[in-house]
Image: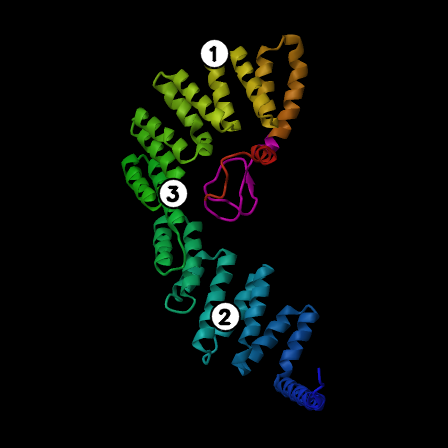
Amino acid sequence: MEFETWWLLSVPFFFALGWIAARVDIRHLISESRHLPRSYYKGLNALLNEEPDKAIDLFIEIAQLDPETAELHFALGKLFRQRGDIERAVRVHQELLARADLLPEIASQAKYELGQDFLKAGLLDRAEETFNQLAVTPYGTAARRALLEIYQREKEWKRAIAAAQALQESGAGNFQKEIAQFHCEIAEDEIVHARPDAALVTLEQALSFDRNNVRAMILNGDALLAKGDTEAALKVWERVEKQSVAHVALVALRLMDGYRSVGRTQEGINLLKAYHAEVPSVDLLEVIFKAVLEIEGPEVANQFVSDELRRTPTLLGLDKLLEARLMVVAPDRRSELSVVKNLVSGYAQKLARYQCSHCGFKAKQFYWQCPGCSHWESYAPRRTEELSVMNQV
């Protein structure tokens, strides 16, 4: 290929352009740095010397002179909030809001950050008041999300429903599952206060938002039982299996008590055994074991647990087996077996936990809303050891 000489001549030209551009950038940077107030450098120096109070004073001085430095305050406020120094974060944002010439968009951002400060500090009333002022600003959606969090913390479920519906209507996401759970919270309170009819109406609303809501079905049975209709409650609880077989463990005790109260204990045992054969569960195993022990005696209960342990070997299951064996073992061996039982039971209790799939928070009891991260329906209805066994299969 013939070499084009003009390419060689263009190299110095492009080099000169690059040199000129670099000089312009350098001059621009120098010019900008000369316009920065001395307080900026003093503030950085104070931060490096771990003098945050002095740094705040200096940065506030900068904001009073130049509104374009507001981003510096937002960064500083977030830093303090993340470190748990809420008082300083509040001070930064309040001083910024005190400016009379602050641009509307910056004022809205400062107000939103101030609301986050109050929320982090647990000052829910002040946080709510602040977020309500942002409804018609660019931070309206974010503020409504924060308000939804506040209403859940305060257990203001009706207001939480309204906030979630407003978010959903604004296109901020799907909140059907959360709204159904808020209705369940209201229904549960109605049952506790002996208002089962009101609970049934509320639960119908919950199911209108989420037809597969297992909790609403369980509470439906609780409300019917509160009305004295045990047979209807049993039919409702049996429908849980069609929604989620794994969640049957949560109603196993209700089912067994219900069948016992209507004089059909053996039918209840057979039903739970069928559920357990489909989806083995330690909670189901315990309910069945106690019922078999009551109806058929320790020998049959011991055999049942032994068979189930061979099918699904878990430490929790072994604990139940040892409990059954203690009832049938010879008196002279009972003391030795009791020591083993206590040792196994201690380890088994550590595994008898439910775990949040979102944050990993573990709890002895089942929660519909995680106490750690506040996510709804993030707990699997199985103990941690059971989940480990399933993953190994």
Judge by depth and name the residue closer to the eye, 323 or 60: 323
Front: mark 2 or 1: 1
Q: Is residue 197 left or right of residue 320?
A: left
Q: CA distance from mark 2 to mark 1?
A: 72 Å
Quick one: label 2 or label 1, which is nearer the N terminus?
A: 2
- The reply, left or right, for residue 393 in relation to residue 259 is right
Question: Which SS does the magenta portion mostly show?
Answer: loop
Mark 1, residues whose alpha carbon is within 10 Å: few (<14), some, or many (≥20)? few
Label 3 Cα crowd, 10 Å radius (few <14 / some 14-19 / many 20+): many
Q: As displayed, is residue 176 above or below residue 61?
A: above
In the picture shown, does residue 380 fall above or below 156?
above
Expressed as whole percent of the image width and height from the top left, the position of residue 369 reads 46, 44
Amino acid type at circle 3 is: Glu
For the point 45% across and 34% down, the residue is 247
Q: Determine whether, in the image, residue 169 is placed left or right of residue 18.
A: left
- Residue type, label 2: Gln
Q: Which mark is residue 94?
A: 2
Q: CA distance from mark 2 to mark 3?
A: 37 Å
Q: Position of residue 135 (x, y in %)?
A: 37, 65
**Mark 2 residue crowding within 10 angstroms, few (<14) / some (14–19) / many (20+):** some
| Stretch in magenta | 349-376
Task: Tell me the residue at 38%/52% (across/down).
Answer: 160
What residue does disc 3 label?
185
Q: Which residue is mark 1?
A: 296
Q: Rounded to the nearest whole Å, what is the CA distance between mark 1 and mark 3?
A: 39 Å
